[in-house]
Amino acid sequence: TATVFLPRVQILAAGSLGWTRPHGGTMEVSIAAERLLAFDSLLTTLSGAGPDSSEHPDPLDGNLSAKLTLQGALDSLEVAAGGSGTDVRWRGISLTSIDGAMTMTRHSAPRFDIQLRADTVTRGHVQFTGLAFRSSGLADSMRWEVQGNGGRFLSLEARGLLARRDTTRLDVEDLRLRMRNGLWRPAAPFSVTLSDSVWSFPGVSLETSDGSAQLRLDGTLPGRGPGELDVTVSGLDLRDVYALLQRDTSHVRGTLLMDLRVAGTAADPTIRGTGNLTGPVFGDFRAPLTRIALNYQRRRLDANLTLWRTGTSLMNVGATLPLDLSWSGDRTGPRQLPGQLAIRAQADSMNLAVVEAFTRNLRQVRGFLTADVAVQGTWDQPRLGGTVEVVEGTAVVPNLGVRYGPVNGHITMSGDSLVIDTLEIGGREGRLVATGYTRLENLTRPVLGLDFRAYDFVVMDVPDFLRIQADGNLRLRGPLFHATMTGQATMRNSVVYFADLVTKSIVNLEDPLFADLVDTASIRQRRLGAAFQSRFLDSLTISDFEFQAAEGVWLRSNEANIQLEGRVIVGKRRGLYNLTGEFNAVRGTYNLKLLAITRAFDVTRGRVRYVGDADLNADLDIEARHLLRPAEAQGASRDIEVTARIGGRLRAPTLALESNIRPPLSQSDLISLLILRSTRSQLASPGQSQQAAQVASLLLSTLTSEIESRLLDEGGPDLLEIRPGVSFGVAGQSTLSRLSAGWQLGNRWFVSLTTGFCQDFQQFDYRNFGASLDYRLGRHASLSVSAEPYQTCLAGATGVATKRYQFGSDLRWEREF
């Protein structure tokens, strides 16, 4: 054994050395190390990285085992080495597992055979799997093969010859680079000459298998020494570039055509070229044909960019920027350099229809844009000048279900700020007015100081999700990607669709006798599409934003249509939202779905209370009532009042039933009454007429529930109730059919019309109609006045018994303690 001590390094070697003849022998050295941290300083010293490199945040670490065998005499030594490692990390590179072997045999000249295999190699966001390398031959002429995969869309196979004499030459005999579904291959075998200062590419040409794209390199890439390289690209799909960089390709489109000449050195390059980018798409950003010309030298970039559409120049942007585009290994410091910059953008009455090419979130864009904008100064202290004007702009936002317009605005740029002189956005209803400024702390860090005032503005109208019409004030303050939103808004004539409380079943009745008819509910999750995701929204902070529900705010699902009033406070930090406050149920309906049957309940009171949970859950306390007449009734008025109490939480609601019958009915009898209008004991031997009545009741209840939902969703009344009557066939007994529709009028008034009729519609005229008027005196008090005809369907008769009007009024005041 031997132990060697160096500064901060300890090396332990163990092995054996044996001689079998005077000038020959065998020696084996085995090394096993669980921690490699001790070797980091040694490797740093050997690599010449400097004395402080050992403080790198990712020093050498991992597990290693290795074995070295030396055999033969000194003049004919044979060497065999092998080893493996796991969880190896060094200087930003991590390897899950690696193993390799090397042999050297010596006859007339040393001959090497090297094999390396790595399971997963990661550096930053770039990752390769299944990497394999093999090389064999003499020291100055070795054949090599390499293969590996980089994510789902990238794989590489290559083979060739590495020759080392005066210079190093890499011969590539075959190369297969698969990116997405396309295969890139060289047009012919090529060679790359490598030296300490430059790499030379004499006429290297790569092309896709279908000939649609080509990349050509000719010349010398500047390094520590000078070089001159011509790069020609044609038909290159941007998705292939992203696949090569192992980035997400799903939201990238575009085709690149480019001619580029790179000269100088890596520390001080010069770059000249032109290019066209056709149909570029980067996420939600889209652009028409883009042409660019650039010239970079002496650390200044002069560029001109022009947007074209159907042969017409839309916008021209010229820029002179102090930048460091060098790629030398010892480069430090920022890319943006001190010095004067100049940017000029001009557009004269540009048709705003071009905006559709920039984003998929806007359609049918109309109007005109005039801009003359100049930016001078430095990166840290830019000076702005010029104006931007939008005239009669309109646009449809499909993801929000709204059309905005006209849009008219004038923005002045002065000093370090963009000041909104006027900006008004009209809508189908109402308008939105913006004021304020955006200040540039530096050219790439805008700070917002914007105020928005909404006047009955329709923000969103997505069927089956959300309709918001609001008054209010909104303020945005802070950096663009970490802004804070405050303010208040009052919703009017709005509809919020929420996950159904139950899905054709009853939730949590806790009755084991009814286990065969009861199922557990699941809540459907409705979410906005990916089009609503953005870096701005993700980083936005919402602080004490007050949302108040005023007149005409409804909470709807397949089972419920409930009018709400109340107030909540909305907050958001990072990706977490929270709500505190509560909404009260003013009126509405709730359709209880039992298997395939629907029974309509009138909401009498309720509360949805948010307590600030991160999952936006809420406490539920809603009460609804249903009146039914049992199937065995023989003309007497024996209506049963069934009350549904919805409790629990919004994501896990519970439902319990009770009635006004004493002694109380069991849950299973109440379910039986709601489904078949008979208790379980009365179902033993029903007559044919009663069976027909039950079937008719089932079909009508399901049909009317679907009709109600459809009419409400398609802009019908705010509240709709259809109560079909059923004939029992017993002495001609039947129940009265009722229809009720209601509308919100202003902030405090609600009016509803009702009518009742028998099955044959005999004697149906204006006297069948009634009406009611509700007036909200305040949050806790209301006044109701109603007039309705007193009607019943007589046994054996063809119409109603009487149409005498009955009048009533209620003054209601309620508080909760």
Image: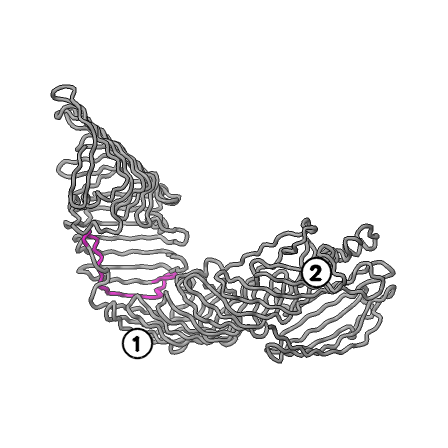
Closest to the observer, 472 or 351: 472
Q: Which mark is residue 414?
A: 1
Look at label 2 and name its amino acid: Arg
Q: Please state the horizontal and vertical placement of residue 17, each as a whole percent of the image.
A: 17, 26
Residue placed under numbered mark 2 in the picture: 599
Q: Position of residue 719 (x, y in %)?
A: 65, 69
Q: Residue at x 25, y 42 (%)?
A: 36
In the image, is residue 416 part of the stretch drawn in magenta? no
Q: Can the viewer see residue 698 in this picture?
A: no
Q: Nearer the viewer, residue 40 or 211?
A: 40
Q: Residue at x 17, y 23 (%)?
A: 18
Mark 2 to mark 1: distance in Å? Answer: 65 Å
Residue 144 placement, left or right of 693: left
Residue at position x 18%, y 35% in the image: 163
Label 2 environment density (alpha carbons within 10 Å; few <14, some 14–19, many ≥20): many
Magenta residues, start to end = 307-330
Name the quadrant of the C terminus: bottom right
Q: Looking at the image, is 249 positioned above or below residue 486?
A: above
Whole-percent x, y for residue 225 in the image: 14, 49
**Picture quadrant where residue 433 is located:** bottom left
- Residue 513 in view here: yes
57, above or below 764, in the image? above
Using the rendered view, name the quadrant where residue 169 is placed. top left
The disc, 2 or 1, on the residue closer to the chain's N-terminal end is: 1
> Could you tell me which quadrant the N terminus lies in?
top left
In this rendering, would 582 be left or right of 731?
A: left
